[in-house]
Amino acid sequence: MKIARRVEAIRAAEVGAIAAAPGDALMRRAAAGVARACIEQLGGAYGRRVHLVVGVGDNGGDALYAGVALARRGALVTATLVAGRAHPGALAAYVAAGGRLGLTGRPDLVVDGVVGIGGRPGLRPEAAAAFEQVAGVPIVAVDVPSGVDVDSGETPEIHVDADVTVTFGSLRHAHLVDPAAAACGAVAVVELGVDFPAGDVEALEAEDVRLLLPAPESDDHKYTRGVVGVRAGSVRYPGAAVLAVAGASVGFAGMVRYVGAAGEQVVAAHPEVVGAGKVQAWVVGSGTDADAESHLHAAGGTPIVIDADALVHLPGAAPADAVLTPHAGELATMLGVSRDEIEARPLHHVRQAAEAYDAVVLLKGRRTLIARPDGRVRVNTTGTPWLATAGSGDVLAGLIGSLLATGMSGFDAASVGAWLHGRAAQACGDGPLVAGMLPDAIRAVVEDLFA
Ligand SMILES: NC(=O)C1=CN([C@@H]2O[C@H](COP(=O)(O)OP(=O)(O)OC[C@H]3O[C@@H](n4cnc5c(N)ncnc54)[C@H](O)[C@@H]3O)[C@@H](O)[C@H]2O)[C@@H](O)CC1
Ligand SMILES: Nc1ncnc2c1ncn2[C@@H]1O[C@H](COP(=O)(O)OP(=O)(O)O)[C@@H](O)[C@H]1O
Ligand SMILES: [K+]
């Protein structure tokens, strides 16, 4: 599990280690990790031109000590001190190692050491100008891309867009949560040997998913494995029914039931699907059009995935054990704000919705977020932009429903479902895909996990 923590928790955990380490030892260790990432990015150090953009705090100190390590390996290192001064010890070591001040020529790589966890969102004009001078050159950010809001993952002001971000000891929220995560590029964590407390934002990895996935026991039968019921599709959108059922039919539940206007199309595509009856979980809403409200009421009180058209028919709180699966536009309608506001502050809004509806809320996007009413959040890090295709959300709703039917909690079902769905898109290759390809790919991903 990848765990991201708040700045305050990280600072508190590091106090002891900083006091115990002699001189700038911790900073030098952090800087060694930054230098390694630069060398990796450049394919070597000797003769490469690296430019440091340096702020007044310890973040700038990290950048300068990284410059020392790079200069010792034969790189030609220059630095702009955006406030005209910098961490004294690091600056002295930098100058002693042959590092120069001021920019000369076009560098091969830029190191962003303006601010880290001590920074306020935005860049002062001198910092912004320093990056403008080297526009288009790849950037390695120290700790976080300067200018992002580290705890909220928001980017309300101008900020650095990095290719690689090197952080220390623990991920911060900005490394996982969009839009800040999109500004980080690839993220590497340098170990500092510090113990951190639990965090409230996390991301599943393959091994976590494998451990959470349901697998049938030898004495199971189809009813003990769980039955999922799908109320999706309509005369206008029969395909949504077929896709939601396809997502529900990847094989986790023992049986899939379908109730709705597209029964013929569903059975033609999935002959094993049966009609109304008892279920352990419902999936309601994908493509249900005007029938959404009646389906929502008819589904009643089992664990339930509420998707698409059904979301707007929820009264104040959702039914018990509900997983709501809006995209940004749907969440905007539910919360009475604009889509732009949701996209600018997804972590804030997904938590607000989970609390307001007293339900697990999965907000779809590049970095899908899954929130519980108590504020705990999982971020999905699998997927490709090709997944943004009509009907892929229907498959996801069905898949989550089938996991719920096996007895998984809503939080686990939603986060495991999102992980598999995204990994399946990656397995389809770096090229176009249609939603109908996902169910087979999900099966192959699960087979790989269990192999
Ligand atoms: N705490 C630790 O254990 C370690 C911290 N390290 C580094 O130390 C950093 C934190 O250092 P600091 O606490 O000195 O804080 P920062 O270096 O992140 O920035 C604080 C300084 O920048 C100024 N500042 C704030 N917002 C600004 C803005 N938008 N534009 C320009 N200047 C701004 C502030 O006035 C302050 O002086 C971490 O991000 C990390 O890079 C590493 O050396 C590893 C160890
Ligand atoms: N830029 C992106 N990168 C990766 N995945 C994305 C991106 N945009 C959307 N997705 C994913 O694509 C799916 C789209 O779902 P949704 O918007 O409900 O589509 P539909 O309603 O057509 O089924 C979601 O799983 C979402 O997380
Ligand atoms: K930085």
Image (tube, rainbow, N blue to C red):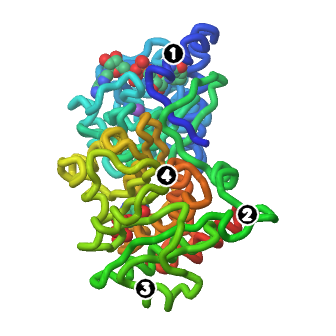
- Disc nearer the start of the sequence (4/1): 1
Whole-percent x, y for residue 199 in the image: 52, 31
Mark 1 Cα within 10 Å, few/some/many (few <14, many 20+)?
few
Marks 4 and 3, how far apart at CA: 33 Å
Q: Using the image, tell me which numbered label, if any, was put on residue 216.
A: 2
Quadrant in which ligand 2 is drawn: bottom left
Q: Nearer the viewer, residue 362 or 185?
A: 362
Whole-percent x, y for residue 372 in the image: 44, 41
* Label 4 C-beta lies within 8 Å of the nearest ligand 2 atom: yes
**Residue pictured at 35% horizontal, 35% vertical:** 152
Q: Nearer the viewer, residue 64 or 433?
A: 433
Can the viewer see residue 420?
A: no
| Marks 4 & 2, CB-CB < 8 Å contact | no
Q: Is residue 32 left or right of residue 83?
A: right
The kind of residue tagged 1 is Ala
For disc 1, the marked residue is 12
Badge 2 element: loop
Vertical relation: 30 (above or below) 221: above
Q: Using the image, tell me which numbered label, if any, was put on residue 364.
A: none
- Disc nearer the start of the sequence (1/2): 1
